[in-house]
Amino acid sequence: MQLGVASDLSQQVLRTDVAGMPLEWIDYREAVRLYHTEQVAYACGTRLYTVFGGYSAFDGRRSSVDVSSIIATVGHSPGHGYVHDQYTPPLNNRTLFKRDANLCLYCATRFPTGELTRDHVTPLSQGGRDAWNNVATACRRCNNHKGGRTPEQAGLQLIAVPFTPTYAEYIYLKGRRVLADQMQYLLAHIPRSSPLHARLSGHLSEGNPFTEDAVSG
């Protein structure tokens, strides 16, 4: 297997089901496998790269597969029955910090990821939960100042209300570098009432790349 000259192997492909619901990010190897096994129902977006295979013994022609930035696949994948309104994505710091655009939700300052912490708005010691709607991105200084207190007890105020991402939002949060056409596609599945919708729509209209640094740095 060989790729075209202008290929970027790190660029992920957005996979959806046949109804168009975003499912996951896949790499070029998995994308080619889906094309080869005829599981791709249709493709949209831009052509990312062309993958070349072997030569035909019959006519000497070389096989090739054009991989698009968004592919819809038939069938069902194990574990993908979660795409519904009640889905709660797993919580981890990487996606939490990206949800909050690397902003400390107390001092409203943007920090590199290594200088951020996960703060429990209602502390665990006071009955708070380690859940999306009770965690906020905080710089070390604000987190240390808050300690085991609530924001009110510590004299702090949140600049945004923590929220649980929908599945489409979680797909965005997991993406390493989201292309404009992929972002446009995901936005159609993100509620307009979501804080992420307004932020990402602004980046899209400005023509900014959707790398982690572009949105959170």
Image (cartoon, helix red, strand yellow):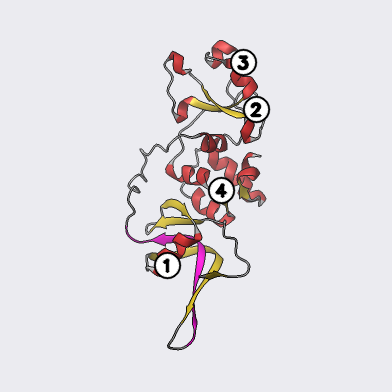
Position above or below: 92 against 54: above
Measured in 3D between alpha carbons, the distance from the residue under mark 2 to the one under mark 3, in whole angstroms, is 15 Å
Give residue 18's position: percent from left, percent from top: 37, 59
Residue 42 appears in the rendering: no
- The quarter of the rendered structure image containing the C terminus is top right
Disc on the earlier residue, 4 or 1: 1
- Residue flagged by tag 3: what amino acid is it? His
Lower position in the chain sequence, tag 2 or tag 3: 2
Residue 48, located in which quarter of the rendered image? Answer: bottom right
Q: Nearer the viewer, mark 2 or mark 4?
A: 4
Instruction: Tell me, for residue 9, which label it has, or none.
Output: none
Instruction: List x then y, in percent, for residue 54.
Output: 48, 77
The local secondary structure at tag 2 comes to: loop
- Give the labeled residue for mark 1: 35
Q: Which mark is residue 145?
A: 3
Which residue position is annotated with label 4? 176
Q: Secondary structure at mark 4?
A: loop
